Image (tube, rainbow, N blue to C red):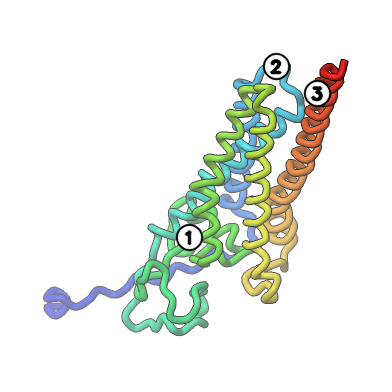
Amino acid sequence: MARGYFGSKPAAPPLPVPRQGPVIDATTIISLLGVLALLGGAYATSVKLLPKATTLKTRILFVWHLFDALIHLVFEGSFLYNCFFVSYSLPTSFSVTSRHHPHIRLLTPPDVYWLGREDQLYGANYGTGPFSRLWQEYAKADHRWGGVDLTVVTLEVLTVCIGAPLALWICELLRREERKGALKRWFWMIVLATAELYGGWMTFGPEWLTGSPNLDTSNWMYLWLYLAFFNGLWVVFPLWILWEAYRAMGSAMSQAEMVDLVNYLKKDS
């Protein structure tokens, strides 16, 4: 007892055990309701800010980009918070070079340590807060989101810090409904849609090319809801936006060519 008082290191807390599935519990339901709440909030904002005469296409574009920004800021922003500020201190007896611990999944290459800390593990798996629980839920399907995968975190930094503000800027351009600014809106939508598609490929491409070691498709909810549906939204909508942008810019060019032709004929007459 005296030895403990005079400085023996206290025992390390037990290692948090990542949540297992496919149990549909309160965290599952709250997480899904959170997504629906952000979508509902985006639609309610469109009703408040957009003119009543707004076309259905413009409203859909506004709702999608605002929903996109909210998902990035609230959910993916919380993922980055977990990666940078939620950690677990390894006991001195644990060798971080052992990559086969039943409750630890190291996602960095050998001899590479997140934030340069050999004695710390970072990520949602080691937290107990609501957003840690949320990402532990999603990590049932894609284990990388429970810890720190260098590619995923790097992409999310760009998504949260650049993609989300750009989506909000597009919402503002849509709200203004300036005819002269139509091509400006489509330009920024093309930039964001291309970035979303590229980010999706860089998220899943490395998995598919290595046999998907971090993906769990053994349960219908993991495969079709978490992986296919939620990630598929960021494929379908960007592709649709690129198609609409192509049509809009092609139409604008045709109109400009017609104006040039009329002006040319007027000069000859």
Left or right: where 159 falls relative to 96? right
What x and y, as percent, mark residue 133? 51, 55
Q: Which mark is residue 69?
A: none
Indicate left or right for 168 with 128 as reference: right
Q: Position of residue 78 (x, y in %)?
A: 48, 50
Q: Is residue 3 above or below residue 25?
A: below
In three-dimensional space, the C-alpha distance between marks 2 and 3, rounded to whole angstroms, equals 31 Å
- Comes first in the chain, label 2 or label 3: 2
Label 3 sits on a secondary structure element that is helix
Name the quadrant of the C terminus. top right
Check the image and name the residue furthest to the front.
268
Quadrant showing the N terminus: bottom left
- Residue type for callout 1: Ala
Mark 1 element type: helix
Q: How busy is the neighbourhood of tag 2: few (under 14 within 10 Å), some, or many (20 plus)?
A: few
Helix, strand or loop at disc 2?
loop
**Which amino acid lies under the numbered mark 3 shown in the image of this protein?**
Val
Mark 2 or mark 3, whichever is nearer to me? 3
Q: Which residue is mark 3?
A: 259
Image x and y of residue 149, in percent: 52, 67
Q: How many marks?
A: 3
Closer-to-camera residue (5/187)? 187
Which quadrant of the structure image shows residue 111? bottom left
Front: mark 2 or 1: 2
Residue tagged by mark 1? 124
Q: Amino acid at mark 2?
A: Lys
The residue singled out by tag 2 in the image is: 52
